[in-house]
């Protein structure tokens, strides 16, 4: 183990990008590049061109902010102020470079200015990455090109092992001597025959115990990404396999089967996780996905053995599914979710999804559902970052509504913001709870 740790330390792909020397070197180089771009000789530069470059950068940044948040609205919430500031910093670098290039007739100077502009953009990108912790290492950043998933094991074992009444699966499980050390990750296409929902490829994690004979009938966790986002976010940024393999190593190869499903079909599309004019997203996640799992894999059955979890949009979606399809999902983990499903505003959501029919929206909106019904047989965990000023108040309000609806819930405040340090911890820190809740361990 020590040798592997040292090897990872010396591999540049595993050097941290969000803290330590690389992050600070990029920050210093970026500010230095901006300073170099801003300082030049001549009264014309100082009195005319430099102010024009700054005004242009501010105007373009404001235009980008308005275009994204007010016109396009690809995200259910607006751009965070910190992100807007760093976009403005990158635009400023490009604007300064544009004005400087006009004054440089020879190529070495132009190459230096272009390099400085690139460093400014790199710095801004690095700072946004540090904010979300999306790519903690180069290995994660390059994962779509350097990583490869395996093929899903769809073989049906002749013998299976189920937990007897009153006991956990771990109580009757004996791992074979040749049990693999690690589980497997496979990319899959999960069709939507009933929903006609078009999605991107998903992923399935099978723990080591799934490869044993007799095959234990393991519980299932359906895991959802955010929006914008994609299922592979949980594989790459979320470190899903290492997380689950670590749990399996501590529990004799046992861990939940994890199905990472696509709830939107595109990073820029928000289907609200509902059956509406937009799509039959709930039917896909509450019927088509479970049906595909049952037909393809050998797993535990029943709502107590099935859980759903997700981050941000996916967190809101996990609560929606637990409340609107309680016969399917008995447990949920809502990570940094919203107060209500939204396309940017309540009015826009109701209009586009239900043609302005408030009653149709309220029939499936979590806050309204919990005001009408009680859910004493459902359990869940709400997780949010301590510094998440936008989503923490929303999570606290929804948590209070869940308590009033008799849902067995916890509220966990994690160090961090709306970022992957919170998202990863929300799953890894609650695997023990999830395993007990779904009957895997006692």
Image (tube, rainbow, N blue to C red):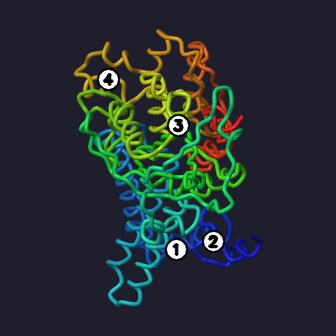
Label 4, on which residue?
347
Q: CA distance from mark 3 to mark 4?
A: 41 Å
Label 2, on which residue?
15
Label 1, on which residue?
33
Label 3, on which residue?
300
Q: Whole-percent x and y of residue 144?
A: 43, 65
Secondary structure type for disc 2? loop
Q: CA distance from mark 1 to mark 2?
A: 24 Å
Q: Whole-percent x and y of residue 423?
A: 58, 45
Task: Tell me the mark number nearer the camera, choosing from 3 and 1.
Answer: 3
Dot 1 and dot 2 residues touching (CB under 8 Å) = no
Q: Whole-percent x and y of residue 79?
A: 44, 44
Dot 3 and dot 4 residues touching (CB under 8 Å) = no
Secondary structure type for disc 4? helix
Q: CA distance from mark 4 to mark 2?
A: 46 Å
Q: Whole-percent x and y of residue 24?
A: 64, 68
How would you rate the neighbour count of disc 2 (Cα within 10 Å): few for under 14, some for 14-19, many for 20 or more? some
69 to 145, vertically: above or below: above
In the image, taking residue 155 as reference, residue 209 lies left or right, namely right
């Amino acid at each position: 183990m020590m040798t592997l740790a040292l090897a990872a330390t010396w591999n540049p792909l595993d050097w941290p990008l969000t803290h330590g020397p690389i992050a600070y070197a990029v920050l210093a180089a970026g500010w230095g590049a901006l300073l170099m771009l801003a300082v030049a000789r001549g009264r014309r530069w100082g009195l005319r061109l430099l102010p024009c470059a700054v005004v242009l950068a501010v105007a373009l940044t404001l235009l980008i902010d308005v275009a994204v948040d007010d016109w396009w609205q690809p995200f259910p919430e607006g751009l965070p102020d910190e992100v807007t500031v760093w976009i403005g910093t990158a635009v400023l670098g490009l604007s300064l470079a544009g004005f400087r290039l006009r004054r440089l007739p020879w190529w070495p100077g132009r190459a230096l200015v272009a390099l400085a502009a690139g460093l400014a953009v790199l710095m801004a990108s690095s700072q946004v990455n540090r904010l979300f912790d999306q790519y903690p290492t180069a290995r994660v950043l390059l994962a779509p090109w350097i990583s490869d998933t395996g093929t899903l094991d769809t073989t049906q074992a002749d013998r299976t092992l189920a937990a007897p009444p009153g006991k956990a699966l771990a109580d009757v499980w004996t791992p074979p001597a040749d049990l693999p050390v690690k589980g497997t990750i496979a990319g899959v296409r999960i069709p939507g025959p009933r929903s006609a929902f078009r999605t991107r490829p998903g992923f399935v994690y099978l723990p080591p115990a799934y490869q044993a004979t007799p095959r234990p009938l393991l519980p299932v966790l359906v895991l959802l990404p955010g929006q914008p986002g994609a299922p592979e976010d949980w594989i790459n940024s979320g470190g899903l396999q290492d997380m689950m393999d670590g749990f399996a190593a501590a529990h004799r190869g046992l861990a939940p089967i994890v199905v990472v499903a696509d709830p939107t079909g595109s990073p820029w599309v928000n289907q609200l996780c509902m059956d509406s004019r937009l799509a039959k997203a709930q039917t896909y996640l509450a019927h088509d996905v479970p049906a595909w799992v049952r037909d393809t894999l050998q797993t535990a059955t029943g709502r107590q053995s099935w859980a759903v979890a997700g981050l941000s949009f996916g967190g809101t979606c996990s609560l929606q599914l637990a409340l609107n399809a309680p016969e399917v999902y008995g447990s949920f983990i809502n990570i940094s979710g919203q107060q209500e499903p939204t396309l940017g505003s309540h009015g826009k959501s109701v209009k586009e999804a239900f043609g302005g029919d408030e009653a149709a929206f309220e029939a499936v909106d979590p806050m309204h559902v919990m005001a009408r019904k009680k859910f004493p047989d459902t359990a869940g965990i709400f997780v949010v970052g301590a510094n998440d000023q936008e989503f923490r108040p929303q999570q606290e309000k929804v948590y209070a509504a869940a308590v009033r609806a008799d849902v067995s819930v916890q509220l966990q405040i994690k160090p961090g913001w709306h970022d992957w340090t919170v998202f990863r911890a929300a799953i890894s820190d609650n695997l023990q709870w999830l395993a007990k809740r779904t009957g895997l361990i006692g």
